[in-house]
Image (cartoon, rainbow, N blue to C red):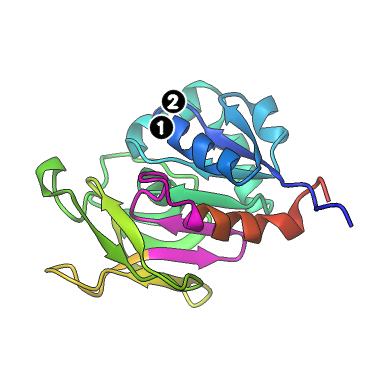
Amino acid sequence: MPAAPQPTVGVLALQGDVREHVAALELLGCATVRVRRPEELAACDALVLPGGESTTMARLAHTFGLLEPLRAAVAGGLPTLGTCAGMILLAERVLDGVEGQETIGGIDMTVRRNAFGRQVASFEGPVTMSGLDEPVHGVFIRAPWVEEVGPGVEVLARVDHGEAAGRIVAVREGHLMATSFHPEVGGDSRVHQLFVDLVRPRSRVE
């Protein structure tokens, strides 16, 4: 039997780690679309919201007429992965945000922005994640963490060392998945594979 076609995954390309996510997805055989306009979003079977600056991304999405289409797509069932700033964008509630900070929403969680500290407090370390046999290399850069989750949210990973031990850094709720860290850094595509495995049964191309 021929292999099932991989989904087309969009990467929000307004600001942030777009190229790295595209490379990780294409390594897995996915077609990719850099999403800057509503019509590009409409062509996607799934979406990645990359790391970057959450307030800038939300502001640019509003400017490009993308914010409401993004909200509608996520609410309508578009599988979406948010990493670092993307996690903030998928949160229903944000602590330590800027005044008037907007999100796309979708995951019933409260996220604390810049929870691990400023840029100088960025760090790397192993993260044990549900669904993976071996830890992933977590890169935390001005990263958020999850303060609390609703009853329908599955916790996929917590920090297991340092002062932040026990803090939630990866979650999934239905078709939505988010990480505090940057899985696109370092050439390990296993987190992206978890997401693609989540996407594939919902893909329009199958």
User: Relative to 98, is 37 on the left or the right?
Assistant: right
User: Residue 193, labelled with which disc?
Assistant: none
How far across and down, in percent of the image, does residue 189 sit?
Answer: 49, 51
Q: What residue span does the magenta drawing correspond to?
A: 170-191
- The answer to whether residue 112 is visible is no
Foreground of the two, 4 or 119: 4
How far across and down, in percent of the image, does residue 169 sit?
Answer: 34, 63
Disc 2 residue type (three-letter) = Leu
Foreground of the two, 180 or 88: 180
Q: Which residue is mark 2?
A: 60
Residue 175 shown in magenta: yes
Residue reaching furthest bottom? 151
Sort mark 2 into few (<14), some (14-19) or many (20+) by Cα contacts within 10 Å. Answer: some
How far across and down, in percent of the image, does residue 75 sit?
Answer: 63, 52
Foreground of the two, 61 or 145: 145
Disc 1 residue type (three-letter) = Met
Residue reaching furthest right? 1
Mark 1–mark 2 distance (CA, rounded to whole Å): 5 Å
Determine whether the residue tagged by mark 1 lies in a helix, strand or loop. Answer: helix
Q: Which residue is pictured at 44% across the width and 44% down the height?
A: 103
User: Relative to 15, is 154 on the left or the right?
Assistant: right
User: Relative to 18, is 80 on the left or the right?
Assistant: right
Compared to 138, does 20 lie above or below? above
Q: Which residue is pictured at 80% across the width and 52% down the height?
A: 4
Q: Which image quarter holds the N terminus?
A: bottom right
Residue reaching furthest front? 1
Determine whether the residue tagged by mark 2 lies in a helix, strand or loop. Answer: helix
Q: Are marks 1 and 2 in contact (CB under 8 Å)?
A: yes
Q: Which residue is pictured at 13% across the width and 69% down the height?
A: 162
Q: Which residue is mark 1?
A: 57
Sort mark 1 into few (<14), some (14-19) or many (20+) by Cα contacts within 10 Å. Answer: many
